[in-house]
Image (cartoon, rainbow, N blue to C red):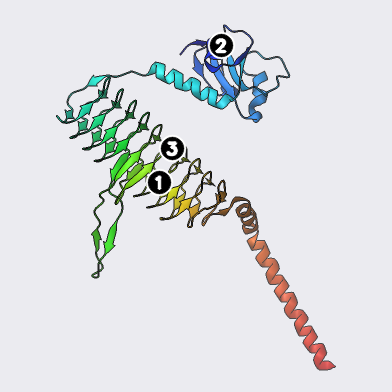
């Protein structure tokens, strides 16, 4: 990696302040930067480091006022965080191996259709009637089940298993160990106490620009489709159950479980280890803090929830503050009860005397 400040400013359409020929060779946290480092400041609490850093180039927000002399070249942009992310993406594309062709040993069914510039890694299996778009990369040890359709510019990392009839859109990334299209958890109880499996005959539909983290599982629908809509970002170790739906541009953190037939709206932010019961709906823009349990539908958009069972975020914080003082409050309550009993006894004695 080697860029000049001028090249970065042009790429980000930013306003350059300082030496345009300063060169960066690596990225770093601003508080740990050395010569040649590229850094960014998006959080105001890190602004103080701008005046002490050894970094060569720092990306900042337009509204940041520079009140002291600075050593690095500064590039002002509308949004430092997203601009830094764009720069990393650009670098990552430059570094990409751009693998092409079919490695051996691997299996590609005669009825499969492979788009231009595809890469299929060794020990991969491409089943009957699979359709791969252009620039698809399937890394070693992956399985693509029959009748699966995969769009353009899709990257399937090693060890991914995609079951039959799955539909995947364009610009999707699926990380290692993920399983898409496995059977939903459907069993009917019998009179003798045993369970009979219900055939899962639906599929999974993943729309464009979705990223799925490692070891995540997305179950096929019992009937119809389990749907992951455009722009969704799923972390590692997430379970999406049969017939669930995740709305556009929703982000879900690790170890969250979405139960069957639950509909999560668009632009939601779901923290880690959140659990959702089945057959509920989550309104658009809902924010759910980590380890919250959602036991009923959320009908008001942009609600912020916390705790288990989850309820209004501010109310939950107040409840937590009260909970911490419960032992002290219990002692005070016991003391009040003793005092009340003493007063009642005294009143009874006085009444008897009179």
* Residue identified by numbered label 2: 5
Front: mark 1 or 2: 1
| In this rendering, position of residue 112 left or right of residue 46 | left
Q: For mark 3, does the 10 Å Cα neighbourhood hold few (<14), some (14 to 19), or many (20 or more) residues?
A: many
* Residue identified by numbered label 1: 245
Which secondary structure, mark 3?
loop
| In this rendering, position of residue 233 left or right of residue 343 | left
Q: For mark 2, does the 10 Å Cα neighbourhood hold few (<14), some (14 to 19), or many (20 or more) residues?
A: many
Is residue 6 positioned above or below 334 on the image? Answer: above
Residue 80, located in which quarter of the rendered image? top right
Q: Residue at x 27, y 49 (%)?
A: 183
Choose between 19 and 56: the one closer to the eye. Answer: 19
Q: Residue at x 75, y 80 (%)?
A: 342
Q: CA distance from mark 1 to mark 3?
A: 11 Å
Quadrant of image for the N terminus: top left
Choose between 111 and 61: the one closer to the eye. Answer: 111
Residue 119, located in which quarter of the rendered image? top left
Residue that lies at the very extreme toward the left in this rendered image = 110
Is tag 1's residue or tag 3's residue first in the polypeptide sequence?
3
Is tag 1's residue or tag 2's residue first in the polypeptide sequence?
2
Q: Residue at x 33, y 40 (%)?
A: 205
Is tag 3's residue or tag 2's residue first in the polypeptide sequence?
2
Residue that lies at the very extreme toward the right in this rendered image = 354
* Residue identified by numbered label 3: 232
Choose between 222 and 83: the one closer to the eye. Answer: 222
Which secondary structure, mark 1?
strand
Q: Are marks 3 and 2 in contact (CB under 8 Å)?
A: no
Q: Are marks 1 and 3 in contact (CB under 8 Å)?
A: no
């Amino acid at each position: 990696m080697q860029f000049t400040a001028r090249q970065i400013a042009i790429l980000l359409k930013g306003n350059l302040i300082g030496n345009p020929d300063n060169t960066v060779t690596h990225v770093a946290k601003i508080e740990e930067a050395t010569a040649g480092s590229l850094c960014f400041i998006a959080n105001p609490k890190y602004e103080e480091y701008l005046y002490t850093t050894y970094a060569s180039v720092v990306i900042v927000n337009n509204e940041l006022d520079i009140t002291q002399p600075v050593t690095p070249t500064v590039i002002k942009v509308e949004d430092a965080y997203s601009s830094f992310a764009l720069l990393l993406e650009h670098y990552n594309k430059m570094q990409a191996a751009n693998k092409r062709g079919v490695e051996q040993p691997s299996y590609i069914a005669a009825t499969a259709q492979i788009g231009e510039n595809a890469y299929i890694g060794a020990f991969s299996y491409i089943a009957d009637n699979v359709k791969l778009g252009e620039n698809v990369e399937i890394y070693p040890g992956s399985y693509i089940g029959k009748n699966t359709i995969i769009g353009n510019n899709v990257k399937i990392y090693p060890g991914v298993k995609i079951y039959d009839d799955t539909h995947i859109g364009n610009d999707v990334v699926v990380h290692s160990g993920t399983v898409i299209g496995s059977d939903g958890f459907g069993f009917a109880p019998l009179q003798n106490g045993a369970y009979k499996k219900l055939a899962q005959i639906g599929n999974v539909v993943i729309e464009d620009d979705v990223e799925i983290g490692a070891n995540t599982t997305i179950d096929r629908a019992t009937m119809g489709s389990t749907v992951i809509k455009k722009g969704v970002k799923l972390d590692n170790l997430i379970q999406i159950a049969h017939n669930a739906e995740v709305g556009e541009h929703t982000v879900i953190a690790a170890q969250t479980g979405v139960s069957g037939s639950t509909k999560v709206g668009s632009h939601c932010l779901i923290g880690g280890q959140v659990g959702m019961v089945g057959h509920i709906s989550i309104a658009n823009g809902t924010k759910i803090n980590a380890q919250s349990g959602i036991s009923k539908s959320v009908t008001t958009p942009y609600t912020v929830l916390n705790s288990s069972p989850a309820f209004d975020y501010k109310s939950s914080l107040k409840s937590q503050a009260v909970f911490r003082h419960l032992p002290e409050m219990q002692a005070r309550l016991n003391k009040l009860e003793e005092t009340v009993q003493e007063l009642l006894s005294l009143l009874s004695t006085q009444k008897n005397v009179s």
